[in-house]
Structure formats: structure tokens, C-alpha cells
Amino acid sequence: SQQGEEDPQALSIQEGENATMNCSYKTSINNLQWYRQNSGRGLVHLILIRSNEREKHSGRLRVTLDTSKKSSSLLITASRAADTASYFCATARLLGNEKLTFGTGTRLTIIP
Amino acid sequence: EPEVTQTPSHQVTQMGQEVILRCVPISNHLYFYWYRQILGQKVEFLVSFYNNEISEKSEIFDDQFSVERPDGSNFTLKIRSTKLEDSAMYFCASSDQLGFGPDTQYFGPGTRLTVL
């Protein structure tokens, strides 16, 4: 698999349900970031979790990081129609100017 | 809230023409980046810029590409002779310093480049 690969590729759930997306990566990282992208639009930063952190919360978002398994998950609770978008994880390496390596993304559709 | 801005939002050009994509990073940020996303594909890193010089570039960033920070506020990406395969959404990003390195990267809304 490639650095920063999300699964599932697509996810459809009913409004109000929780959505969980996973990301796996290969190399050691400094941090992992999650972004949202509405169709054809820009990337909106959601949350950053550092390699020494295991869990982080921001509003309805919960991110976990397991560096031993080189994986992360993004949980969106109580989903809303406005959450419909593509979600990407992006990893920053340990050294260097922290270029981000993006995954392939999960396309989330919230059904009203 | 401060944000990264990019102009134009959409640029259409003929193959072989030069284009300049412009970005205004968040004020006081120190690290600047260009990424691109070909339709339906993942976002790819092009180049990073710090302390008035390129700090890293990808294989994509060949001699046809250049970046500049001409006046302390703008950050530009120039493609000298565009090719059909340069058609993509180009994103600018900037980040502040945290400790000895960059912090969270904030992205602009993108410029959609169409090469005909």
C-alpha cells in the first residue's frame, strides 16, 4: 500500500450515524493531519495529531494514532449532510520541511 | 480568521504558454508550499520554500517550474511552457514555525489550470 492510504474508499451512512475512516502509512512520521475537501474545492484542515499523541478531539471529530501499527482513524460523530465530502489523511516526515504526503481519500456521503 | 488566498481561481491556457499562479500566504507564516491534484487523483507535493529558497522539490518540479516570493507577501508558481498533463488543481499552502520546524499547513482554495 502507499504512504497515507485510506479505507474505505467510499462510505455512505445515514444522517446522525457515526462515520469512521482509517488511514495507514509506511514510514515514521512527525505528525498526521486530516483534511476535508468538498467536491472540486480547497482543502480544509481538520485536525493534527503528533507522533507522541494517541488520541485527539475537536468538536465532533475524534482522531486516534497508533504508531506501532502505522495507522490512524478519524471518527465523525452525529454526522450531518454538510459532512459530505472527501477526507484525506496526510503525513509529515520526521525530518525535513514537513512536506505532506497525502492518501487517496475516503469519499463520505451522508444521506439525509 | 487569516486564510491563504490564490488567484486566479481558474486559468485556461494553450499548450506551450507560460502561466503564473499567485498565492498570498497567511501573514507571518514562514514556510510555503505548492501542491497539485490532477482530477480524481491524490494531492501531490511539488515544492517547499523557506528562508527565501527552495527547501525541497519533487520529481514533478522540473526545469519548467519555478517559484518566487517577489515582495514578501506573494508566493508565485510559474510554469514556463505548459503541457497538457499540467492540467490540475494547484494548491498553495503556508505554515508557521513550531519549535524547529513548520506547524500545521493551511491551504488556499486552489487554482484550476486547464491546458488546451
Image (cartoon, grey):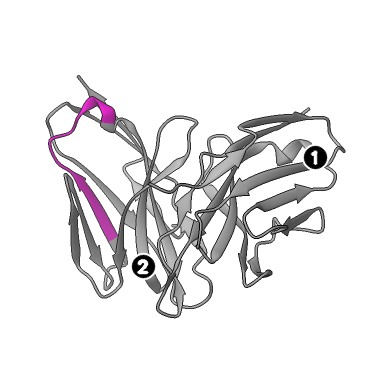
Q: Is residue B48 left or right of residue A46?
A: right
Q: Chain of mark 2?
A: A
Residue ID for mark 2? A31
Q: How packed is label 1: few (under 14 Cα within 10 Å), some, or many (20 or more)?
A: some
Spot occupied by residue A110 in the image (x, y as percentages of width and height)? 24, 27
Res A38 seen here: yes
Which residue shows up at 53% across the image and 71% down it?
A: A97
Task: Identify residue type, mark 1.
Answer: Lys
Element assignment for label 2 = strand
Q: Is residue A73 magenta?
A: yes
Please tell me whether residue B17 is drawn above or below residue A23 in the rendered image. Answer: above
**Which one is nearer the viewer's eye here, B102 or B40?**
B102
Which residue shows up at 69% across the image and 55% down it?
A: B60
Q: Quadrant of the C terminus of chain B?
A: top right
| Tag of residue A96 | none
Q: Is residue B53 left or right of residue A68?
A: right
Q: How packed is label 2: few (under 14 Cα within 10 Å), some, or many (20 or more)?
A: many
Element assignment for label 1 = loop
Q: Quadrant of residue B73?
A: bottom right
Task: Identify residue type, mark 2.
Answer: Asn
Q: Is residue A79 left or right of residue A87?
A: left
Q: Is residue B52 left or right of residue A78?
A: right
Spot occupied by residue A2 in the image (x, y as percentages of width and height)? 46, 57
Q: Which residues are magenta?
A: A72-82
Please tell me whether residue B8 is drawn above or below residue A27 in the rendered image. Answer: above
Which residue shows up at 70% across the image and 58% down it?
A: B71
Residue under disc 1 on the same chain as residue under disc 2: no
Q: Is residue A101 magenta?
A: no
Q: Chain of mark 1?
A: B
Residue ID for mark 1? B83
